[in-house]
Image: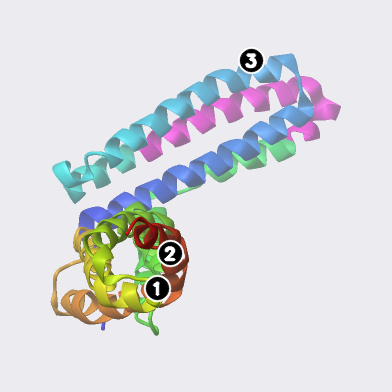
Amino acid sequence: MVLMLKTETAISIAIRHYTNSIYTNIKKVDEESSKLNYKYLNEMIAPFNSEIATIQNTLVALNNVVGEKGAKYVEQKLIEIDAHIKETCVNLITKIQIKQGELKLFASKFDDLLSAILALAKRDVTTFIKLSMDKKSEKINALNDGIPTVSEISSVLRLPELHSGDLYEEAKDEAVYQARRNYDKYNENTDTLEFIEAYIYPSISELTLDIMKSAVKKVIVQNEDGEVFLNSKLPLVNSNFWKRNLGKLARELQPMLDEFVEEE
């Protein structure tokens, strides 16, 4: 079974990966610049950092219109951004090399800084995006190995709404509602977990499964394999989620259920 991200989703995730990688490069440039701590160098780095910040903002803005503009538009803009990055790096490298020529014997002090800038300049956006998408595809298909957790699906598919803690809290609100509706079926001799399994679990299980399906549908291709994942794999994921959390829910609801008994 092969799962596929929708094209715009795959590109969007890869752009975020690319943007984050630029942050890593810039951090390295800043670290090497700070080691030298020369006023004239800081004056050179300042416009470079400003230009890179503009590029990063452009990437964020581009990522926000992937679905609207389409893949070809985004690919062209990425090539333009890549050229802008290279030009910005070359400008800084040229300035530093001129300074190296002036310093002569101390020129090697700038080697590590130049290497950090070159690492950013040599990055090819087209290759980076393709490799990022290929790697993401491998991780997505790894979700078919056994039964993934909700957290794994959330992480791989970049679905924050499936953070397990948030999902549990949303289901807990529904559980409280169902507990109030069915409190008359609970007494001091009732096993809390059995009560939850009978009167609360069906509702909260349906709720979490619907949330999972709705989130996953937004990002994967609705082909045969996608349907199998939605309708066969996710119910098992949901079942395992509640196997891990139903006891916790019982412990948290018991004080409220006991209050219902006392009030009677």
Q: Which span of residues is magenta-colored?
A: 81-110
Relative height, residue 148 to residue 125 (above, below): below
Q: Residue 201, percent across and down? A: 28, 72
- Pointer 2 residue: 254
Give left or right: position of 91 versus 181: right
Task: Examine the image and state in which quarter residue 141 appears.
Answer: bottom left
- Pointer 1 residue: 192
Q: Are marks 3 and 1 in contact (CB under 8 Å)?
A: no
Q: Residue 223, percent across and down? A: 14, 74
Q: Residue at position x 66%, y 36% from top?
A: 114
Is residue 109 rendered magenta in the image?
yes
- Pointer 3 residue: 43
Q: The residue tagged with tag 1: helix, strand or loop? A: helix
Q: Residue at position x 67%, y 22% from top?
A: 98
Which-is-in-front pick, marks 2 and 3?
2
Distance of label 2 from label 1 (alpha carbons): 6 Å
- Residue type for callout 1: Thr
Is residue 4 rendered magenta in the image?
no
Residue 229 seen in render: yes
- Residue type for callout 3: Glu
Q: Are marks 2 and 1 in contact (CB under 8 Å)?
A: yes
Q: Residue 120, percent across and down? A: 53, 42
Residue 158 seen in render: no
Task: Examine the image and state in which quarter residue 237 appears.
Answer: bottom left
Name which of mark 3 and mark 1 comes first in the sequence.
3
**Mark 1 Cα-neighbour bin, 10 Å: few <14, some 14–19, many ≥20:** many
Q: The residue tagged with tag 3: helix, strand or loop? A: helix
